[in-house]
Amino acid sequence: MTLFESAVRPVLFRVGGGDAERAHEFTLKRLAALPAPVRAALKARYATAKPVEVFGVRFPNPVGLAAGMDKNGVALPAWPALGFGFVEVGTVTAHAQPGNDKPRLFRLRDSEAIINRMGFNNAGAAALAERLQRLGPLRSSKLGVPLGVSLGKSKVTPLGEAVEDYLTSYRLLHPYADYIAVNVSSPNTPGLRTLQDKDAIADLLGALRGETPVLVKIAPDLTEPAIAELLEVCLSHGAAGVIATNTTLAREGLAPADQPRAVEAGGLSGAPLTEKARKVVHFVHTETAGRLPIIGVGGVMCADDAARLFDAGAALVQLYSGFIYRGPALVRAAARSI
């Protein structure tokens, strides 16, 4: 057991009377306030040099922070210090929005899982662009690692106007991003997953053409024929890659003590998603014959989970729930697993 698991995590899990979202906000504020000498010391301990180039972008190591952890980019300098080889901020929307009603974030400790129905709560694309502008337009040159930006659809925007909504965010943010992730797979915005349909994703990718690589984030709950159809569109419309996967609506694999939480609406992440994510990554890699780079995400709770995603065909991996439960030692171990 690491120092984080024995000493830091119990404290964080008690913040706000055990309220997961309050603990999340508390942690972000502390990370944002880390002084430069502390960040340097952390980086010396956790950073791993395993350089790799994917979709034309050079990564110092292939383990990144998944979207959702730092939606508004408030703690950007902290993530490379904790060993991450790239950072994905967001998901952000063209319009600022509060997200769904609280409570909306739940830990399932025995299952090492999380259920969230946040609903793309964020300050909006313009606010994120203003913050990133302070880093300058050279993206990773200021942050030290590549920066991805995840875009979603504003809840107030009708599905028929989704392309223009994404395009508004893209225009504001692509100058600051090493890649753009198109999130059409969150289960927490009504109707969003219909944008994974062949015609819808074709229209969206056609509108977002540009110099910045665009990746599509897919749900783990799609059937293989549906994934295959989506991949065909990604290949024919210039997508730079796929992020596999988002959270799942399924509730398999929960520990008995966590079964009462299974009724909570939202997407499930963490250990119950490990095998499902690996299978989707393997299917995408096989179906595209390796032509479409994959960021594998979902249930990476140990170095072996990361290694199995790489073996399945992932070029990069991301952490979210695993980082919550395991801390920065997991970042280092995952980076060393290849």
Image (spheres, helix red, strand yellow):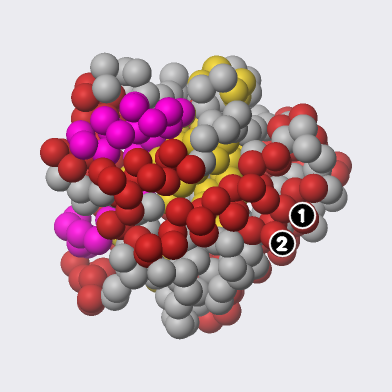
Which element type, helix, strand or loop, lies under badge 2? Answer: helix
- The residue closer to the viewer here, 129 or 105, is 129
Residue 299 is marked as none
Q: Is residue 201 left or right of residue 260?
A: right
Q: Residue at x 37, y 24 (%)?
A: 292
- The residue closer to the viewer here, 280 or 16, is 280
Which element type, helix, strand or loop, lies under badge 1? Answer: helix
Mark 1, other Cα within 10 Å: few <14 / some 14–19 / many ≥20? some
Q: Residue at x 32, y 23 (%)?
A: 313
The answer to whether any part of residue 329 appears in the image is no
The residue labelled by disc 1 is 131
The residue labelled by disc 2 is 127
Quarter of the image where one finds residue 57: top right
Q: Residue at x 32, y 18 (%)?
A: 290
Q: Are dots 2 and 1 in contact, CB under 8 Å?
A: yes
Q: Residue at x 55, y 76 (%)?
A: 98
Does residue 126 show up magenta in the picture? no
Amino acid beneath label 1: Arg
Q: Is residue 56 left or right of residue 294?
A: right
- Magenta span covers which residues? 228-255
Does residue 248 show up magenta in the picture? yes
Image mark count = 2
- The residue closer to the viewer here, 275 or 147, is 147
Percent of width and height locating residue 245: 34, 44
